[in-house]
Image (tube, helix red, strand yellow):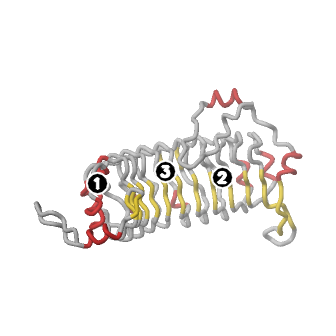
């Protein structure tokens, strides 16, 4: 059997997009037998009510299973590792009420419908074929990976009031509508088709933001406040004033590589506007640059000071 479906993501690498017909021809789903389930269970712990003990970890990664109906009986499982399979239907998992962590990357999911997941904190749905994200009822969810799908609209993040890490890179988003929730501290949006940052200012606590490899021309709507790291590589930003107008007073890392504005970039002008920077386009800010930026800009026609 070919390994075309085992699209394990490497850093910064777009997964292969094979058609469903090709994938079905390459691989047939394996039956989820009692023996396979038994061999995949570990981690005996007390049940939530303390009246018994049960297995809490289920590891079925890479087993090429499709139908997971039998998993519905494992109501005490807290950690479910189901990566690299052929799963399409998640409804049997709605019975796993005590899930803390769920890994479903590299499957065949088009939608995600899990019902209420009161304890879920970590969820990975990357490398599937999800077209629209409507959210999951998971009030304690802190980490959500939706990268490398086909997502063009995002709604429902208000269901995840504790969400801090959101990964949406490698999708088909054209705008930032719906992706901003105040508690998020890290969000990746690179490798999309974004042309506008409208709605992104709601990210009041974001520290790391990656918007590389999009179609941005201007930065109106960019969140400020807590922003520490901002990646804008490979966009269409050509106006230096758009960069110097950034209001993130604590910004330390800024990457503008492969933008028109990066050609002959005036690093000192950028540093005057963003004095907290320690790295620009991957190159550390030197003490000499800091010294020049601390001086008033020269009058027009006057050579810059070398003191």
Mark 1: few/some/many CA within 10 Å (<14, 14-19, 20+)? some
Point out the frontmost of discs 2 and 3. 3
Q: Quadrant of residue 85?
A: top right
Mark 2: few/some/many CA within 10 Å (<14, 14-19, 20+)? some
Q: Is residue 173 left or right of residue 17?
A: left
Mark 1 or 3, nearer chain start: 3
Task: State the quadrant of the N terminus.
Answer: top right
Mark 3: few/some/many CA within 10 Å (<14, 14-19, 20+)? some
x and y percentages locating residue 140 in the rendered image: 61, 66
Q: Which mark is residue 224?
A: none
Mark 1 or 2, nearer chain start: 2
Point out the frontmost of discs 1 and 2. 1
> Label 2, on which residue?
114
Q: Secondary structure at mark 2?
A: loop
Mark 2 or 3, nearer chain start: 2
Which residue is more in the foreground, 170 or 157? 170
Which residue is more in the foreground, 161 or 127? 127
x and y percentages locating residue 217 in the rendered image: 31, 48
> Label 1, on which residue?
265
Residue at point 26%, 73% (across, down): 294
x and y percentages locating residue 176 in the rendered image: 41, 52
Residue at point 34%, 70% (across, down): 287
x and y percentages locating residue 305 in the rendered image: 19, 68
C-alpha distance separating marks 1 and 3: 35 Å
Q: Secondary structure at mark 3?
A: strand
> Label 3, on which residue?
154
Which residue is more in the foreground, 75 or 213? 213
Q: Is residue 218 left or right of residue 84?
A: left
Q: Is residue 213 visible?
A: yes
C-alpha distance separating marks 2 and 3: 17 Å
């Amino acid at each position: 059997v070919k390994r075309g479906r085992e699209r394990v993501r490497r850093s910064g690498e777009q997964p292969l997009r094979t058609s469903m017909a090709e994938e079905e021809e390459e691989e047939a789903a394996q039956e989820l037998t009692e023996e396979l389930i038994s061999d995949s269970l570990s981690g005996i712990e007390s049940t939530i009510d303390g009246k018994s003990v049960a297995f809490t970890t289920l590891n079925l990664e890479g087993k090429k299973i499709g139908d997971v109906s039998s998993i519905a009986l494992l109501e005490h499982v807290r950690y479910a590792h189901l990566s690299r399979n052929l799963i399409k239907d998640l409804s049997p998992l709605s019975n796993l009420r005590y899930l803390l962590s769920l890994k479903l990357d590299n499957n065949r999911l088009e939608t995600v419908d899990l019902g209420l997941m009161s304890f879920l904190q970590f969820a990975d749905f990357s490398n599937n074929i999800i077209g629209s994200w409507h959210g999951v009822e998971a009030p304690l969810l802190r980490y959500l990976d939706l990268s490398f799908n086909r997502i063009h609209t995002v709604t429902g993040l208000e269901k995840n009031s504790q969400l801090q890490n959101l990964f949406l890179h490698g999708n088909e988003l054209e705008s930032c509508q719906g992706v901003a929730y105040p508690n998020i501290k890290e969000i990746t949006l690179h490798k999309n088709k974004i042309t506008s940052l409208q709605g992104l200012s709601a990210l009041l606590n974001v520290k790391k933001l990656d918007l590389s490899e999009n179609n941005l021309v201007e930065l109106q709507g960019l969140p400020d406040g807590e922003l520490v790291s901002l990646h804008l590589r490979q966009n269409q930003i050509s106006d230096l004033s758009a960069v110097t107008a950034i209001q993130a007073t604590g910004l330390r890392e800024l990457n503008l590589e492969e933008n028109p504005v990066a050609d002959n970039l005036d690093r000192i002008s950028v540093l005057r506007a963003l004095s907290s920077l320690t790295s620009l386009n991957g190159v550390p800010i030197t003490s000499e640059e800091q010294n020049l930026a601390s001086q008033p800009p020269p009058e027009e026609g006057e050579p810059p000071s070398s003191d």
